């Protein structure tokens, strides 16, 4: 059985990687930027660092992000509204969802959408299930689980393997 995926051709894309400070969003954005440039695209970036004193993990003040605007023609700004948001946890989703236009793509790490993590940022119910994200193209992916599975042949602890989820995304 062959599954056909919808393909859309875009003249430019704004993508934002968001997660806890320390999740490697700046590194992920930097690597994605390098790969984008390798293909000859023009680009502009906007890293967003939280305060110097690290906020508790999974909280809104601790969200870090990296935005990249790229195209095959001249780019003059890092973009206003992301076409794609990669949210590593509920805090990253909540802190960035307001910037997304209707129809934007949202990739979320479902492994982090636990009851405790949702409560920590004020979600009464999971936004992945309550219909509040119906205006977007939601892609729920168990990034942590997939990363750990992909690295199981290496001699890494689970914690060490989980640190690679940003690159897996």
Image (cartoon, grey):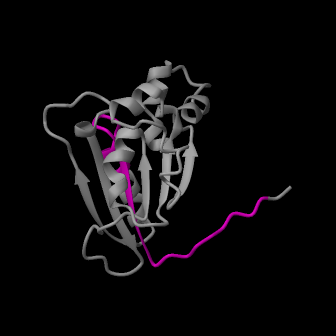
Name the residue at 52% across, 45% down.
130
Image quarter of residue 20: top left
Name the residue at 25% across, 72% down.
77
Q: Is 35 drawn above or below residue 75 in the view shown?
A: above
* 18 relative to 148 in the view: left or right: left
* 3 relative to 155 in the view: left or right: right
The residue lying toward the viewer, choosing from 49 and 96, is: 96
* 29 relative to 145 in the view: left or right: left
Q: Which residues are magenta?
A: 3-30
Q: Is 128 drawn above or below residue 163 in the view shown?
A: below
Name the residue at 27% across, 37% down.
21
Q: Is 148 drawn above or below residue 35 in the view shown?
A: above
The residue lying toward the viewer, choosing from 9 and 125, is: 125
Is residue 169 something one can see in this rendering? no
Image quarter of residue 81: bottom left
* 57 relative to 38 in the view: left or right: left
Q: Is 46 drawn above or below residue 121 in the view shown?
A: below
Image quarter of residue 122: top left
| Image location of residue 121, percent across then percent down | 33, 35
Pick the quarter of the image with the N terminus. Answer: bottom right
- Magenta stretch contains residue 159: no
């Amino acid at each position: 059985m062959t599954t056909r995926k919808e393909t859309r051709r875009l003249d430019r894309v704004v993508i934002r990687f968001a997660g806890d400070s320390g999740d490697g969003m700046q590194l992920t954005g930097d690597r994605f930027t390098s790969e984008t440039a390798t293909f000859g695209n023009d680009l502009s970036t906007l890293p967003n660092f939280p305060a110097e004193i690290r906020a508790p993990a999974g909280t809104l003040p601790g969200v870090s992000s990296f935005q990249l605007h790229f195209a095959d023609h001249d780019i003059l700004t890092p973009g206003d509204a992301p076409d794609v948001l990669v949210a590593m946890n509920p805090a990253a989703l909540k802190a960035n969802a307001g910037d997304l236009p209707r129809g934007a793509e949202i990739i979320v790490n479902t492994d982090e959408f636990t009851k405790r993590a949702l409560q920590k940022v004020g979600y009464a119910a999971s936004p992945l299930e309550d219909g509040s994200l119906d205006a977007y193209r939601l892609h729920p992916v168990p990034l942590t689980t997939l990363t750990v599975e992909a690295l199981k042949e290496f001699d890494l602890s689970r914690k060490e393997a989980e640190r690679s989820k940003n690159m897996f995304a």
